[in-house]
Image (spheres, rainbow, N blue to C red):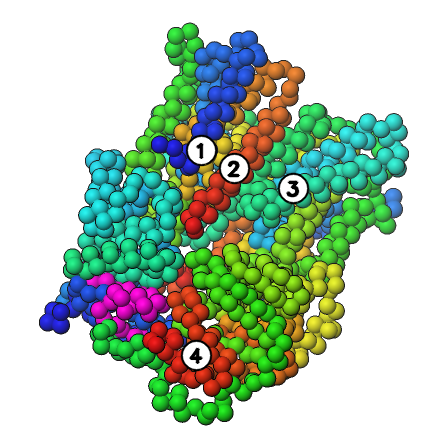
Amino acid sequence: MMMRISKHHLFWPLTVLAGLFVFNLLYDPGFFAIRVQGGHLYGSLIDILNYGSPLILVAIGMTLVIATAGIDLSVGSIVAIAGAIACLLISRGEDQHSLALFAVAVAASIGIALVLGLWNGLLVSGIGIQPIVATLILMVTGRGIAQLVTGGQIITVSSDPYSFLGAGWFLMLPFSIFIVGFVFVIAVLMTRKTALGMFIESVGGNPTASRLAGIRSKSVLLAVYAFCAICAGIAGLLLSSNVSSADGNNAGLWYELDAILAVVIGGTSLAGGRFFLAGTVVGALIIQTLTTTIYTIGVPPEITLVVKAIVVFAVCLIQSESFRSTIVHRWKTRRYPAEREVTRGV
Amino acid sequence: MFRRKYIPIFITVGLFALIFALGSFRYTGFFSTQVLFNLLIDNAFLLIVAIGMTFVIVSGGIDLSVGSMVALTTMLSASLLQEGLSPALVIPFVLLAGFLFGAGMGAVIHYFNIQPFIVTLAGMFLARGLCYVISINTITINDKFYQSIALTKIYLGDSFISISVILALATLLLAVYLAHYTRFGRNTYAVGGNEQSALLMGLPVARTKVLIYGFSGFCSAMGGVVFTFYMLSGYGLHAVGLELDAIAAVVIGGALLTGGVGYVVGTFFGVMIQGVIQTIITFEGTLSSWWTKIVIGMLLFLFIVLQRVLGARAGSSQTR
Amino acid sequence: MGENRPILQMSGIHKRFPGVIALNNVDFRMYPGEVHALMGENGAGKSTLIKVLTGVYAIDGGTVDLDGAPITVGSPLEAQEHGISTVYQEVNLCPNLTVAENIFIGREPRRFGKIQWKELNRRAERLLAERLNLNIDVTRTLDSYSVAIQQLVAIARALNVSAKVLILDEPTSSLDQGEVQELFAVMRKLKEQGLGILFVTHFLDQVYEITDRITVLRNGELVGEFMTKELPRMDLVLHMIGKDLELLADLPASDFGQAGEASGETFLKVTGLGRQGSIEPFDFMIQRGEVVGFAGLLGSGRTEAARLLFGADRADQGQWQAAGGGKVDSPRQAIRRGIAFCSENRKTEGIIEDLTIRENIILAMQAHRGWFKSIPRKRQEAIADEYIETLNINPPNPEQLIKNLSGGNQQKVLLARWLLMEPNLLILDEPTRGIDVGAKAEIQKLVLALAKKGMAVLFISSEMEEVLRVSDRIVVLRDRQIVRQMTGEDIHHHNVMQAIAGEN
């Protein structure tokens, strides 16, 4: 029984998360406390969910991309562009509080995110450029575009509907949690209730066999990159709405890396194939909890980076087959290094 | 003799000449040796870092840690100097640290067969994080030696260059020699061309890969030293995003991100193109700095698609 | 020649892999100045033997003597140092380096550590000209030359290491006739220079044209060593396939051609279909309810022909007259026309390792329906259960990941995938390879049953007996061409063997 539990894909991520919680609890016995104040729920756990929302969103999209054996480096830039466009449109409006203006701004940013995603998808599936290279283009250009949109300034807006997105409350909880929940449910429905999820895993796991089975891998790739960009776009809206401003330079900086990390921690392999959306969410929560923890114990927040580095190394080493086999068959691989090299390719 | 593999590098050189000529026609005072020299002065550290990156990319890998390594070097240098250590000790020490850091990543990449992207990503986090472990604030450098190097101008005619430029050009020459006249360099190309073949041909693949990342780490540290001369301070937020500039320079310089093809000289022009675009944007006055990123992104796109097209054609000619 | 001492002597070689004995007590010897063919079908142990010899695999038992002295070969590099060099089918050189560099990399002439390019290029030119009669610009990159030249460069590299034994592993499979002759000229020249050449190929004509001696392996065991001149083609084929003529003749005649009822309704007809470098243009037609067998040795073009029919590879010439439309360009299109193809490479072209049995079964059906018309979960489970039962898939758990299944059960899952599509034409490429005898018979029976129901089946197998048993009509391929078709009374093991061997 223990074996079966420990083999479940959520076992390790959840264990790590629980470990972090316990650590926090020891440090601050009130960690789990949630209090009601002015009809809103407050507490560390709520904060983690709230601040973690944008990352969870981006990571959900990234999961699908990685499942196709791809990667999307441009999500950070898309986060910045989406926030910038929405704020620009709202700041230009006559009545910033207008609901219609808000709707136009949101639709425009998500529309642009979609276009950018299709662009990535086209480079990958149409022209056949490696994903890491193809999305690098937008990663570089996108930052510039975001700054172009904001004119290099930080655009501040004061729009009630807009700030509700990322800073509002609904049913006593931060509204962003509902957005994340909504996107998560959509992603799950889209991948598990239609055949898309199976196609993604199939294209990521074995592209040749997928082609021979008649799967249209091009449209699968296109859809996945588009979805990932939309997720990043929504995350950009949440981030900028939370502070009611857009910063083309710093918004979404390093998000691509955190998102990839969350996906990998969640158990999805960078080599593509099986993907775990719930695992990704837990992975993103681990990263967010880590950040929060470091804040609470009073270490300079920048040191999170060192911890992240260690986590990346650890996760990759565990996933690395060579690492495991090195430990197991140390003597054998020593003597015949070529056998390892050749059989690895098979 | 005209060869297809040189097309990207010709385009790069031509593009540089074209942009420089455009600038010269449009702006008075643009066409001068000093503007040219300033390109070198302002981009010396980028050039050095990009040279290391060229080897990594030619071998079919990628190194995301270079920007952080530059920052870590500035931080290490500044804090050690603050402790009163002599530059004669500090500089060799940071160079060695850079080499070991890179070689360590290379070893993990090779022996555990983990993608370079992920390993160097972790290296990037680690190096940046270590900066903050040293200090989260800027440490200014008051060392006489550093200051005098920073201020030294070497006059060639009426125009001048800095000592950093000499260091960068020396690195460039060393790298060209390494790439084309040593076994290490040729093995790098072989690994990038086909790692499996290189192994079956009996080349020392493991040693080569470790050395490649070690060399990139060394170049990052060297770039960091030059950057320290330039900024006279150590700071954890120095050189953020430098890895992207370096990768862009290498790709614009005609290297294939899939490995096997690339030239150190091409990288030199890749860096110069980025520099000249920045200069034009400064001269234009009304254009803002982000146009640099947009233009460089478009150039990246152009070169990647170009390589893809050339590659596809080479592939089809091969299968008759 | 016989008086000479063998330059290479391998005795009692054993090599085990988890679950498989790849080489069982195999002997092999080679004399200097001879071309020696190593023959065998899939799984015979050819490539394992070569990998043992070149130090890629460690041996579990046996000895290797080179020039009379025992050696151990720990790596490809060590093999080269001993003078054993290999040229593989996929040229194992670096396409981005120059020809000269590919020959000398790792051994470049240097002075004070600096590579002497002029010297290197001169040596490369001399080596190619003197030993291989090849005059090319050695400063161009390797990828600017044809595969044939690349092969020769690979040979030159091998020679450069003072080779005593040269292994050519299927060097001719992507060369055209002229290029093959060029290669043979080089081989003859090297033979005169006293080299022992181990030649692996699927082309019988080439074996008889160039080799002096033949060693045949089958199922990891040595069948025998023969002088080429003294071994009739028929016998060679029999040795490779492993059935005695008498045994085949004893097969009850009633087993032959029993699927029987070709409907007279043509389902698919192609004329002049071909693809350069893979299969010569051929004509082919198949009727509903008919089982056509493709017979031929590995590499004869049987798989290549089937792939063109399914659109897995694109034909560069030929006419189509298929039911419900013209040309088939992609697997998707083929599937829409009711064609299904079960590839011989289960692992790389068939299963999706990360998916379950259920998902692997419904994959093609779902791809055909599109994303949104998802097959309801209940229905999926019913389908999976049905096929698990009819095909006897083990373990009978539809949620098991397919990568945990044995090869035979994976094959059954793939079969289920295509049966579910109820195709008009089912192409089965080596459906029984690596499957135990019982399962084999089941699959053969299934093929006959399907044909009775009106399905056209194209059955490809290395096992003569099997092809004879299920086919109404047999198409024989040799050296990438269809060489003979036979029906009815004509179907006889002897005729098939003759056609495969190329004896008339």
| C200 within the magenta span | yes
What kind of residue is marked 2? Leu
| Vertical order, B52 against B149 (above or below) | below
| Marks 2 & 1, CB-CB < 8 Å contact | yes
The residue labelled by disc 3 is: A119
Tag 1 secondary structure:
helix
Which corner quadrant of the image does residue C355 belong to? Answer: bottom right
Which percent across, then down, holds residue B117?
Answer: 51, 45
Which percent across, then down, holds residue C35?
Answer: 23, 65
The residue labelled by disc 1 is: B7
* Magenta residues, start to end: C195-218
- Looking at marks 2 and 1 on the same chain, the residue that comes earlier in the sequence is marked by 1
| Vertical order, A14 against C418 (above or below) | above
Tag 3 secondary structure:
helix
For the residues beneath circles 2 and 1, the answer to whether they share a chain is: yes
Q: Does C170 sit left or right of A131 as displayed? A: left
Check disc 3: other Cα within 10 Å, few if <14, some if 14-19, many if 20+. Answer: many
Q: Nearer the viewer, mark 3 or mark 2?
A: 2
What kind of residue is marked 1? Ile
Name the disc covering residue C503, or none.
none
The residue labelled by disc 4 is: C463
Tag 4 secondary structure:
loop
Q: Which residue occupies 40% across, 72% down? A: C297
Examine the rendering and report whether any part of residue C388 can be seen.
no
Query: How far apart, in angstroms, are the residues tagged by discs 3 and 1?
Result: 26 Å
| Marks 1 & 4, CB-CB < 8 Å contact | no
Q: Nearer the viewer, mark 4 or mark 3?
A: 4
Which percent across, then down, holds residue B265?
Answer: 40, 29
What kind of residue is marked 4? Glu
Name the disc covering residue B306, or none.
2
What kind of residue is marked 3? Trp
Q: Does C192 sit left or right of B160 as displayed? A: left
